[in-house]
Amino acid sequence: MAIVPINMQEGKIAEEKRELIVGIDLGTTNSLVAYMDGDKPQIIKDPENGTALVPSIIYFSPDGQILVGNAAKKYLTEDPQNTIFSVKRLMGKAFGDIKSFKNILGYQIIDDDTDSLVKIRVKDKFYSPIELSSLILKELKTRAEGVLDTEISKVVITVPAYFNDTQRQATRDVGKLAGLDVLRIVNEPTAASLVYGLGDTKENESTAPAKKVAVYDLGGGTFDISILEIGDGIYEVLSTNGDTFLGGDDFDRAIIDYWLAQNIIQSKEMEADKSLGQSIRLAAERAKIALTENDFFSQEINGQLLSISRQQFEESIRPLIEKTIDLCSNAMKDAKLVPKEIDAIVLVGGSTRVPLVKASVNNFFSQADQKSGDERLKDYINPDETVALGAAIQADILAGNNKDTLLLDITPLSLGIETIGDLMDVILPRNSKIPAKVGREYTTSVDGQTKLKVAIYQGERQLVGDNRKLGEFILTGIPPMPAGLPKIEIGFIIDADGVLNVRAREKRSGVEQTIEIRSQYGISEEEMGKMLIDSVRNAKDDMKIKALLEARNEGNHILYAIDKFIHQNPDILSVGEVMTLLDHKTHLQEAIDGVDKDLINVRIQELNDFSAPLAHRAMDKTILDAMKGTSV
Ligand code: ADP
Ligand code: MG
């Protein structure tokens, strides 16, 4: 089974012809798009000013305009409430996952106290990270279409190696929502390795031992180290490590701290005058960038001379760099390798331009061995472009232009199961390599539930009704437990012949049930093509319905929880509080009966705001009672 080339404009299976697929790096700080110009990957630059990077920032203006990229950057300090940055950190995350850092984001993230995915509130609208990221992706699509003068419908998108299933699926949805067919999600370190041809083997070398590659990626806000093993065209991630809050932004802060320590600037003044604060922050970044080439930086800001030498800068960032080296060391331990076993070290991310970073990484990998790190060190002149260039190379391979690269067998359409609200939950995404074995854990939604229906679907649409049903079975004999407690693993196993086995297993009790599906390829390529095109065409509506259904599910979940709460805590609630809770419940129920997802979200938030302190009171009482119980 090979990739079916689809012509998105005409809705037909494309003829065998050279086709343009672009590669996209959706970064935390900056995003880029690249394509293959002959056999050379090229970044697509802004035709007006020649810039390659699109800052991953979105601004919602008071008059309803949406600005993306450089145009949005200045609003970070001018209008932080309505300026979204670092949305990649929120992809596929629940509120509980991001609680610890939500305060550093200037915009509003909704705490609905549930484990559903986060939402961002801008004025009276609620957005998912998927919707926000798709705005950045659309900007890149528009840029590429303008420069290349052709419509772009297919892309390869990169993600960090540590992204989980949910985060990868979210990234696929970003593409779909931007009107693009995401042919593949590629790991960022894999893309970077492609740029240096590290996976290439000459014919007579096909038995060559696998290469071990370390990819050191220091961006604006995150640091990732990945150790890969590359052989026979397979890129295996041996280990990953990193720090999701360490990057170039911290270098800027280190410079500001230096100026503060020198009494050149005052923190009080910076806080009082936001625009002065912003100018100083920007000056710090300029200083950092200048010190890559020069030994000294100075500039006058507001009548104050800000200066710093390369040496002073290096002293102030040394601890940060040492931290990244410690993490490299951990990654090497996890991969069970020592530095001299590494065949190549790839530097990625804008912050690896800093000479001390390069030198430190080089030093770590060449320590105590004869090999000099230098000859193994791969650093492109523009390390912030590497990942996008690699994505373009991968795209070219998928387009069939690179005949030397073998395409492995893959699944032509996504496979998944039906979850609450008739939604499709993809377990094995389209274009996954087979054979494959994947699993995901689910739980029950009602107290005492003993049965679970598992319905298997194939297709790209958000609602199962629009996809193709492959089969279903019922897992019975789940021991009665409170909702949310059972751990039910649904596993998908596809063998080399494409036969799909689905297994559901309740982990606590061990009850299980399986089904074998042989007919998943029983559709023609025409039909398959149509399904793909429909999914992109309907992405916007699908996502809307999905958001509404999810809001309803969440609302119903909360109504259920509130009932239980009132029932279980009669003695700590006043009559007035119960009345107010019931009022809120009615309002939420009304919203759920309607079709406005934003209204449902507003009502959920109101109910949560009111009930949170009551829940704390109930918790305190439980703890108090428990303590009473244990005292002698
Ligand atoms: P991300 O992958 O997180 O989106 P990038 O790889 O684009 O980020 O890196 C952005 C960071 O690189 C920013 O902190 C920026 O200041 C920094 N940077 C860019 N150019 C230089 C330079 N010449 N010297 C030092 N840092 C740089
Ligand atoms: Mg990056």
Image (tube, rainbow, N blue to C red):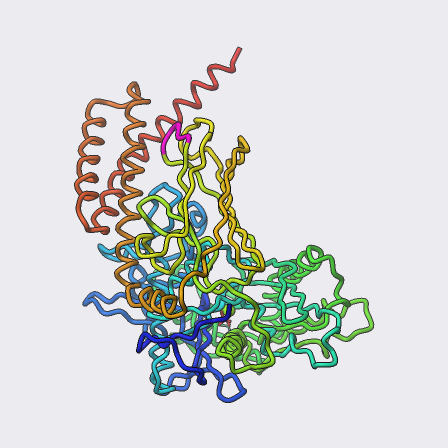
> Can I make out residue 31 in this image?
yes
Looking at the rendering, which quadrant does residue 274 occupy? bottom left
Where's residue 542, x and y in %? Answer: 29, 58
Does 207 sit left or right of 178 as displayed? right
Q: Nearer the viewer, residue 363 or 433?
A: 433
Is 561 contained in the magenta span?
no
Residue at the extreme right of the image, as rendered: 370
Q: Residue at x 61, y 63 (%)?
A: 225
Give the main secondary structure, helix, strand or loop, of the magenta stretch: loop
**Magenta residues?**
446-450
Is 449 contained in the magenta span?
yes
Q: Residue at x 48, y 39 (%)?
A: 488
Where's residue 46, x and y in %? Answer: 38, 83
Does 20 sit left or right of 613 as displayed? right
Does 458 sit left or right of 407 as displayed? left
Q: Residue at x 71, y 70 (%)?
A: 211
Where's residue 485, x and y in %? Answer: 45, 33
> Can I make out residue 307 in this image?
no
Looking at the rendering, which quadrant does residue 236 occupy? bottom right
Indicate whether 468 appears above or below 396.
Answer: above
Q: Nearer the viewer, residue 434 or 598?
A: 434
Looking at the rendering, which quadrant does residue 311 occupy? bottom right
Where's residue 366, x and y in %? Answer: 76, 70
